[in-house]
Amino acid sequence: MENTLRPVLVGNVADLPEKLGKTVKVGTKEIAVFRLENGQIRAIENRCPHKGGVLAEGIVSGEYVFCPMHDWKISVIDGKVQDPDVGCVQSFPIEIKNEQVFILLEE
């Protein structure tokens, strides 16, 4: 059986501040959405795997967010924590239609 992806509206591209995170709640999931300097929009789980820091409140630099609690560097592309730390958060695909941003979630 194939997993289908359900689009969940985040808002308009223009509503997402550059280099800052936005928290989006979908059911029990909390997702951090970022608009990067290069215009890309990315979404990852909103909790650092180390101590649960809220990643949407972290500092964004390039394609990484730094956890506000202990400065862990996490890729907003694939959710991988960067060396020397280890761990991963879930990343979510994004779709943009007519300047509206959607997170694609598995049904």
Image (cartoon, grey):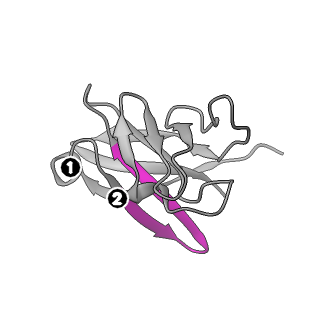
The answer to whether the residues at label 2 and label 1 have Cβ atoms under 8 Å apart is yes
**Residue kind at label 2, given as amino acid type:** Lys
Which residue is drawn at the image coordinates 22% and 46% (left, top)? 13
Tag 1: Cα neighbours inside 10 Å, few (<14), some, or many (≥20)? few
Q: Residues within 10 Å of mark 2 (few under 14, many from 20)?
A: some
Q: Residue at image x 36%, y 28%?
A: 62
The relative height of residue 34 versus residue 107 in the rendered view (above or below) is above
Q: Magenta segment, which residues?
A: 22-34
Residue 34 lies, in percent from the top left, at: 36, 45
The verdict on residue 16 being magenta is no
> Residue 22, which numbered label?
2
Residue 2 at x, y percent in the picture = 77, 43
Q: Looking at the picture, tell me which residue is in the foreground, 13 or 55.
A: 55
Real-space CA distance between mark 2 and mark 1, rounded to the nearest whole angstrom: 8 Å
The residue singled out by tag 1 in the image is 17
N-terminal-most mark, 2 or 1:
1
Under circle 1, the secondary element is loop
Q: Residue at x 48, y 55 (%)?
A: 55
**Quadrant into which the N terminus falls:** top right
Residue 35, placed above or below residue 25: above
The residue closer to the viewer here, 10 or 107, is 10
Q: Is residue 29 magenta?
A: yes
How many numbered callouts? 2
